[in-house]
Image (cartoon, coloured by chain):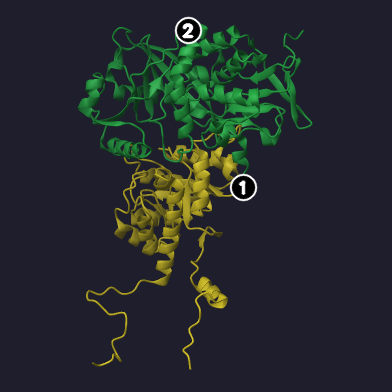
Amino acid sequence: MTPSVESPSSPSVEAAAKATAKAAPLVIAGRTFRSRLFLGTARYPNQQVMLDALEASGAEVATVAIRRVSLGGQSETVFDLLKDRYFILPNTAGCYTARDAVLTAHLAREALGTNWIKLEVIGDDETLFPDVEQLLQAARELVADGFVVLPYCNDDPVTCKKLEAIGCAAVMPLAAPIGSGMGVRNPYNLQIIREQCRVPVIVDAGVGVPSDVAIVMEMGCDGVLLNSAVAQAREPVKMARAMRLAVEAGRLAYEAGRMPRRLYASASSPLEGRIQL
Amino acid sequence: MTKQPIDSILIVGGGVCGLGVGWRLAQAGRPVTVLERREIGPGSLPAATWASAGMLAPHVEAEPGEEKLLPLLLESHARWPAFARELQEASGVDVGYRTEGTLVVALDRDQAERLRFQYEFQRSLGLELVWLSGDAARQREPHLSRHVVAALYSPHDHQVDNRQALLALRQAFLAAGGVLRERATVAEILVGNGEVQGVRLASGETLHAPVVVIAAGAWSATLPGLPPEAQPPVRPVKGQMLALQTPPNAPLLRHVVWGRDVYLVPRKDGRLLVGATVEEKGFDAQLTAGGVYQLLRRAWELLPGIDEAPLIELWAGLRPGSRDDAPILGATSVQGLILATGHYRNGILLAPITADAVSHLILTGETPESIRSFGIERFHR
């Protein structure tokens, strides 16, 4: 009898492999997203590169700073280019006080017809670290006002727990300062945040390369938001695809579960039944 | 009532592109009329030609994602010296072409990292650039801040006085027999049977023409009557600028100097231009406290010697930004309707090749190789 080896290209096997190798979708505030990568729309060489990068990234969510663009008017805005194909998540970049951020969120809701807001309240010009006190205050006001709030915050588990308690739909701790490309500077804090928060954890800011993305996704973080790592790359469109693959790889690895670590080697082929010479 | 000769070519927009194309057509003996909705000169603000800084800098401004545009920029850059000479001879106006070159400086470690990235990228494109220490940069420009830690020197990135160039083009165009109509607002581009038929002015007057060139800068997409497939995806991108006066015989700078989000352009008459913000604000061309503050702060960081310099002018312009930052040149699906717009930050630099290539297309019916990949059809994929 000849040993039967099923061809890897057999359709039934392939379909089964695809079904089991599919990452779970991301759900935020009851909305399901097909991609766990959120991409920012600033600092690209031009709009066409931004559009091509968004497409290559597979992202469904595109973030847009409300201050950076004018809303309405006769000319082609970034919203016009994006609105038909992406879930636009407005952000409050450039706000330094709770009051400022709340006003900007309202402006975004009126102009774009969305109650989703990525809340940023910056506390320091050099590092762009969030101002926790102002952030919590703004989050409280916006949640009470019916917004779906996704706050950009420090990689501080206590802050994240407070934001969750306020009713934020997700928490978005930073990996490193915005635009720094420094990578994951405190993986242990992110791990604690992941373990302690029940809402989705989207790592926002600071990643530079796909391995940074893979690290936080393998840890079980629910998604990654990035911008400069793609926009400022030598070839943004290629880097967008690289980030997409890293998000998918990291998520699948998390769901698959890593093997146990061991100090010593272990032969992959069984040693039993070897031919004794 | 109309002074327009039979079969005159109409050009909508009296900026550096419209007048450049018009000049070439007039030189070739074709009847041509340029329609300018305001007046050529200061009154044309916030149109881009008067507002810009006249940098001819394809080398230091090359950035990732725009490699396809670079050959066009370099080709036009190569044409500028002869274009400037010809323009000066035809108009008697000195267009202020200067060849000292451009410096891009870094003020701290992070900026130096960024500059190194830029240097390596631009060198990989085969562009000639020299890496300088902070001290070497200050030897070239002694008034630069002591905080300058590194710089790129680009010998081939030159400058021209864009305002003088525009006035020169106006002269040259008229001298070659072109007709200029200022304060002539186009109310509608007339199209029928798939071909352009002329324009209707806001005054009610109709001008018939077999060829109409859209060179209306940031306003190019807003002209009524353009069918959707011929409407260029051009939007206004606001830039605020200011000018300082320095002594012409003891200028603070000789090179064009770039820093983070600011550039400084010295003119022969001692004016030092400081630019420019990049803002997506639609057709709003207001000056703002924040915009002017950022320009002054960044300029002062680079060149503390401006402290005592009189601030003599503030203005804002609207760049005609296309979706991929490259110009939109050539024929459309409407017979006789030609585009010469969307030059974004490169209108002055691209003026010679725009004038040559678009006039060539009109005169011969053939689109020159150099602009073939810059047609509007690239947005219809």
The quadrant where residue B29 appears: top right
**Which chain identifier belongs to the yellow chain?**
A
**Which chain identifier belongs to the green chain?**
B
Observer able to see residue A74 = no
* Residue A131, image x, y percentages: 36, 43
Answer left or right for A169 relative to B225. Answer: left
Q: Is residue A20 above or below residue B347?
A: below
Under tag 1, what secondary structure? loop
Label 2 sits on residue: B93
Q: Residue under mark 2: which chain is it in?
A: B
Q: Are marks 2 and 1 in contact (CB under 8 Å)?
A: no
| Front residue of B166 and A200 | B166
Can you name the residue that lies furthest to the left here?
B135
The circle drawn on residue B81 is none
Q: Residue at x 59, y 49 (%)?
A: A85
Observer able to see residue B15 = yes
* Residue B226, image x, y percentages: 70, 30
Q: Residue at x 42, y 47 (%)?
A: A230
The quadrant where residue B172 appears: top right
**Mark 2 residue crowding within 10 angstroms, few (<14) / some (14–19) / many (20+):** some
* Residue B277, image x, y percentages: 44, 27
How far apart in space, not on screen, are marks 2 and 1 (Cα)?
50 Å
Label 1 sits on residue: A84
Which amino acid lies under the numbered mark 1 shown in the image of this protein?
Asp
| Front residue of A193 and A74 | A74
Can you name the residue that lies furthest to the top here?
B92
| Front residue of B30 and B321 | B30
Which amino acid lies under the numbered mark 2 shown in the image of this protein?
Val
Q: Is residue B162 above or below residue B321?
A: above
Answer left or right for B267 relative to B132. Answer: right
Under tag 2, what secondary structure? loop
